[in-house]
Image: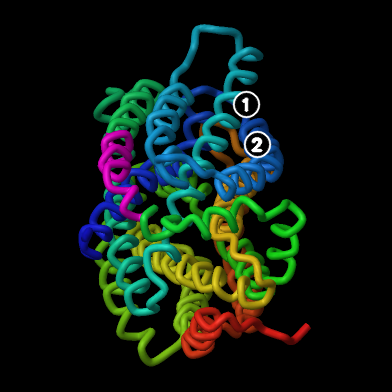
Amino acid sequence: MYSFNKIIRDFTMGGIGQNLVYAFISAAYLFYFTEAVGFSAATVGTILLVVRIVSLFIDPCVAVLIEKTNTKWGKYKPYITVMPVMISLLLVGLFFQPNISKELHLIYIYVMTILFWAAYAFFDIAYWSLVPSITKDAEKRVKLLTICKSGILFAAFGLGIGQMPLVHLLGQGNYGKGFSMLSIIVAIVFSVAGLMLSRTVSKFNDISTGSAKAKKATDKITGKQMITALKGNGQLIVLTFAKLAIYIPIAVKSALGIYFYKYQLGNDSLGSFGSMVALPLTLILISACPKLLKTYSDKQVMSLFVLVQMLLCVCYILTTDLSAFYIVIDGISSALLGVYSLFFTNMVAACVEYGEWKTKIRTESVIFSTNTITSKLATGLSGAIAGWVLTGIGYNPNAAQTPQMLSALHYVLVFVPAIGLLIGFLILRNYILTADMYQKIVSDLSQGKYDSRP
């Protein structure tokens, strides 16, 4: 029998590798293609928007394909095994500068970015779809996600601390070479982590798809039923809009932050110090979450954190030459954002049973695809918005910026995230799926009972 602790270990390793890739490309994409390659911020922003529009069509198809997968290796193992290597190769290719014209290079970037996020969707949806299958016990699931998210965030913030110093070290002053070399290192780590996870993922499949009855039920699910399952899952819809409202403006601030550090504070590596603040604070907050969730609901704890972060964003309006002031605020904000991922994943996992209870249709992969889609949509839209904002306020790559541009950038960093967090807080008020309600739903489902209300 494969122990639960070993499952946690292997699941966490896969998550660490995946999120190193995600953290790297999210933080580096806009800055790399403007500062290293020389495209305008608006051009890069448009790339991200187009890619996200394409992903809106690709990702649901990926979710349906995974939901209907039934191989001798199980439901998820084919994607967990193959995709890390494909994603790694595409990541390295994306940060490679081919010796071609700028027009062809732009086409190259479009193709590579679309392929990268399509491959990423296969792994991400398959990976997170394992959560409700591993355990339906609320405390065990919180333990799984707490340890997993701690490892993920430790790695992500570790990359945040070292990213720009490593780029300077590896590139010896050349952004292009530095980012390319770092992408190779990240790709190798993910490939190894993916291999480690794939060796044991069949143990998860034994839990999630072991019975012929379960496989048969999955095969019978139609596209129409999947749409019905999503439309009938009101709590999932609430979470989707809340996540977008919170993540998009925060990601805009994150994408623009490096420009603020470089041109306002004079050092593009200052974000590393923000990650140093965020790392221990994140681990403390995540360690405290299981105890908090025994007394308070996910919604209550997360709503409090959102309000705290909103106040921090308002404090950012103060003008000072003391870099540490902004570094500490950004560090605390990053820590809170890291904790949100724990809450959203836990709440989305609960929506699997809630959706089955409401619609009599169980679709783990489709439900978790919404988590993937919202994360990628937030990243893409925030990058597009950040690119357009930079162009709109008069940003010039690798040149001295005007006082007007720097002042406008400062105001964007204050009000865009603050307003988004307020909207997200208001949307979260409509989330009603508590721990007690979830346990009742699990009990009802075990007895073949469903919600009879319309």
Kind of residue at badge 2: Val
Q: Is residue 18 above or below residue 146?
A: above
| Category of crowding for the residue at label 1, using alpha-carbon neighbours closer than 10 angstroms: few (below 14), some (14–19), many (at least 20) | some
Q: Main secondary structure of the magenta part?
A: helix
Q: Residues within 10 Å of mark 2 (few under 14, many from 20)?
A: many
Q: Which residues are magenta?
A: 189-204
Residue sitting at x 38%, y 44%: 18
Mark 2 secondary-structure assignment: helix
Judge whether residue 190 is colored magenta.
Answer: yes
Picture coordinates of residue 251, whole percent (x, y): 53, 54
Judging from the image, the colouring scheme is rainbow
Disc 1 on helix, strand or loop?
helix
Give the residue drawn at x 26%, y 52%.
10
Mark 2 to mark 1: distance in Å? 7 Å
Q: Which mark is residue 110?
A: 1
Instruction: Out of 276 and 300, give the one closest to the viewer.
Output: 300
